[in-house]
Image (spheres, rainbow, N blue to C red):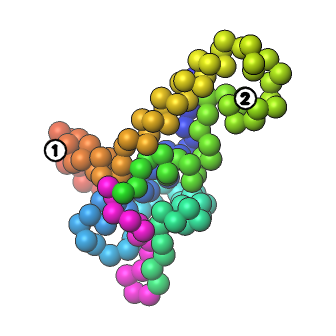
Amino acid sequence: MFRISTKGRYGTRLMLNLAQHYQKGLAARSLKEVAEEEDISIRYLEQIIIPLRVHHLVKSVRGAGGGYTLTRPPAAIKVSEVLQAVEGNCCLVECLEDKNYCPRMSYCAAYEIWKEGTRIMKEYFDSVSLQDMIKIAEKKSRRQPRTTRK
């Protein structure tokens, strides 16, 4: 089954964390703060933040209270943009990206299935914004009993 890699999952969590703070009007977040809150290695976040900056989804803020913040409001950033930045093209099979990958493409029935599945997947991720994820996180946090971290 198709799976989003750790980069995609952690990149989405990083962006959600930044979105939650952006929405509250809080200052930029350091990767150290995000790493602690999300329980993700800071070294891994340092790798993930690079493509997010290259794709202009986040920007760095220098100085006291510096760190990273979103370049646009959470409602204006789609999950598909985050996945595209950290994963690259999300296709179910290679022949959808590389027309020379398989000589059977012109008569392959499975090709049409993979093509439609990929279209539906992309359409869904295009329909979900970071703002939508914030709403989901808020609903889930109301259901969860608060725990204290050590």
Under tag 2, what secondary structure?
helix
Q: Residue at horizontal 56%, vertical 62%? A: 55
**Disc marking residue 95:** 2
Under tag 1, what secondary structure?
helix
**Magenta region:** 63-75
From where the camera sits, is residue 39 visible? no
Q: Name the residue that disc number 1 marks.
A: 142
Q: Residue at horizontal 48%, vertical 72%? A: 59
From where the camera sits, is residue 132 visible? yes
Classify the position of the C terminus by image quarter. Answer: bottom left
Left or right of 89? Residue 149 is left
- Image coordinates for residue 35, horizontal then vertical, percent: 45, 60
33 or 52: which is nearer to us? Answer: 52
Q: What residue type is labelled 2?
A: Cys
- Image coordinates for residue 57, horizontal then vertical, percent: 48, 63
Q: Residue at horizontal 75%, vertical 20%? A: 105
